[in-house]
Amino acid sequence: MTSPYQGLSIEEWTTKTQELIADHPLHLEMIREIALKSYLLKNYK
C-alpha cells in the first residue's frame, strides 16, 4: 500500500489529512481518542 501523501508537496499534506479524516468512517474525536490511547500505551509500558 502506498502512502496517500506520495507525490504531494509538504504544503499539500494538511489538506490531504483533512480529506482522509473526512472520508474515514470514524468521527474525528474517536480517531483522536484512539491515537492518544495508542501513544500512551506505547510510551508507558
Image (tube, rainbow, N blue to C red):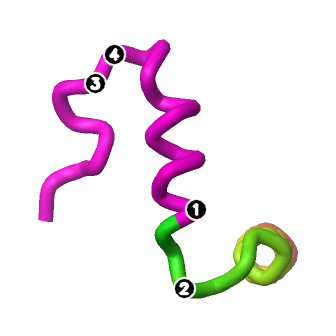
Quarter-of-image position of residue 6:
top left
Quarter-of-image position of residue 45:
bottom right
Do residues under tags 3 and 1 come within 8 Å of each other at their CB atoms?
Answer: no
Q: Amino acid at mark 4?
A: Ser
Compute the Cα span from label 3 to label 1: 17 Å
The residue at which mark 2 appears reads as 25
Q: Amino acid at mark 2?
A: Pro
Q: Residues within 10 Å of mark 1 (few under 14, many from 20)?
A: some
**Residue in the image at 28% along x and 49% along y:** 4
Front residue of 24 and 4: 24
Q: Would residue 27 be found to the left or right of residue 26 on screen? A: right
The residue at which mark 3 appears reads as 8
Do residues under tags 4 and 3 come within 8 Å of each other at their CB atoms?
Answer: yes
Q: Residues within 10 Å of mark 4 (few under 14, many from 20)?
A: few
Compute the Cα span from label 4 to label 1: 19 Å
Membership of 14 in magenta stretch: yes
**Residue in the image at 15% along x and 54% along y:** 2
Q: Which mark is residue 31?
A: none
User: Which residues are drawn in magenta?
Assistant: 1-22
Mark 3 or 2 closer to N-term?
3
Residue 27 vertical position relative to residue 22 in the rendered view, above or below: below
Report the label total: 4
Compute the Cα span from label 1 to label 2: 8 Å
Q: Which mark is residue 21?
A: 1
The residue at which mark 4 appears reads as 9
* Quarter of the picture holding the N terminus: bottom left
Find residue 24 and report its horizontal and vertical position in percent: 51, 75
Q: Amino acid at mark 3?
A: Leu
Find residue 11 and report its horizontal and vertical position in percent: 48, 14
Q: Residues within 10 Å of mark 3 (few under 14, many from 20)?
A: few
